[in-house]
């Protein structure tokens, strides 16, 4: 389980996140929503160690990881996707996903450089696992294509497959269905349900409120870095503070 306790982040006196407490259980999809500039991506950056907290705690599986470096946090079991897709465009789809398995690699750098049997065997295992993951995400037909040549929607899928490759306990999804139509979004939603059923805790940041309402068990709403509502999605969407934050009226 991931828990944020009294998390604060300030930039030169400006409070980007203020006293946020939030629980992300495994096996559930937790929504984190709010208008533009609410602080949602800042929260993700704090969880992953890309930004350091001003105060508060980030607890993963009972351990406070707030002061850990991003690579350590990733190895502990937190993975993410980005608002702006970050793939290696000149590498193949398969190569991009294979990178995601680095957390589980055991062969030494020297073994890899010398092409030793242990390294070759590990690389082949990772390759097979990556192919299976691409099939799961409906990307088998694109395995050998350059990632940069794919459509936006397919690049999103590749990025998510790479994030899942690290076998995370918690998966942070930053606007994963942005720019997708309902059919594409619903197909990804089915995969998110499968991941939750596999005991992964998902955090879903998304502006598509209808999608959030359908997918999430619990939703947290931020406005100007502050938590203004929390609870089951249908209840949250009717909350007066949420309506004002989104629509600017009562």
Image: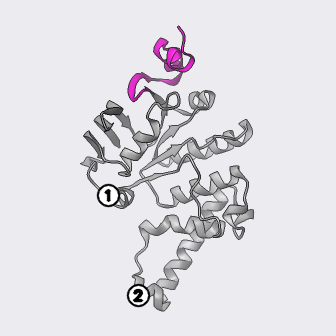
The residue sitting at the top extreme is: 250
Q: Secondary structure at mark 2?
A: helix
Q: Residue at x 66, y 69 (%)?
A: 92
Q: Residues within 10 Å of mark 2 (few under 14, many from 20)?
A: few
Image disc number at residue 69: 1
- Identity of the residue drawn at 55% across and 59% down: 162
Residue at 49 percent of width and 66 percent of height: 101
Q: Is residue 223 visible?
A: yes
In this picture, which residue range is highlighted in magenta? 223-250
Q: Which circle marks residue 110 in the picture? A: 2
Quarter where residue 225 is shown:
top left
- The colour scheme used to paint the residues is one colour
Estimate the spatial distance between the alpha carbons at disc 2 and disc 1, rounded to whole Å. Answer: 25 Å
Dot 2 or dot 1: first in sequence order is 1
Looking at the image, residue 114 sits to the left or right of residue 23; the answer is: right
Q: Residue at x 47, y 46 (%)?
A: 172
Crowdedness near tag 1: few (<14), some (14–19) or many (≥20) residues, C-alpha within 10 Å: some
Residue 23 x, y percent position in the rendering = 36, 35
With 109 as the anchor, is 143 left or right in this view? Answer: right
Q: Position of residue 76 (x, y in %)?
A: 35, 57
- Report the mark closest to the observer, 2 or 1: 1
């Amino acid at each position: 389980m991931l828990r944020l306790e009294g998390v604060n982040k300030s930039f030169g006196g400006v409070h980007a996140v203020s006293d946020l407490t939030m629980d992300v259980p495994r096996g559930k999809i937790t929504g984190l929503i709010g208008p533009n500039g609410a602080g949602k991506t800042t929260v993700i950056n704090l969880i992953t160690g890309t930004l350091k907290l001003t105060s508060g705690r980030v607890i993963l599986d009972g351990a406070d990881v707030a002061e850990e470096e991003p690579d350590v946090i990733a190895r502990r079991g937190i993975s993410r996707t980005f608002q702006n897709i970050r793939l290696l465009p000149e590498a193949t789809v398969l190569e991009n996903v294979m990178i995601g398995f680095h957390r589980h690699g055991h062969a030494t750098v020297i073994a890899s450089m010398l092409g030793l049997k242990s390294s070759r065997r590990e690389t082949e295992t990772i390759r097979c696992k990556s192919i299976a993951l691409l099939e799961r995400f409906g990307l088998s037909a694109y395995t050998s294509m350059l990632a940069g040549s794919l459509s936006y929607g397919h690049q999103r899928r590749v990025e998510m497959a790479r994030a899942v490759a690290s076998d995370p306990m918690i998966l942070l999804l930053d606007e994963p269905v942005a720019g997708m139509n309902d059919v594409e979004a619903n197909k990804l939603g089915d995969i998110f349900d499968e991941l939750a059923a596999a005991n992964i805790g998902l955090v879903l940041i998304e502006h598509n409120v209808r999608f959030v309402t359908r997918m999430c068990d619990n939703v947290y709403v931020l406005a100007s870095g502050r938590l203004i509502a929390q609870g089951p999605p249908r209840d949250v969407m009717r909350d007066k503070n949420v309506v004002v934050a989104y629509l600017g009226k009562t």
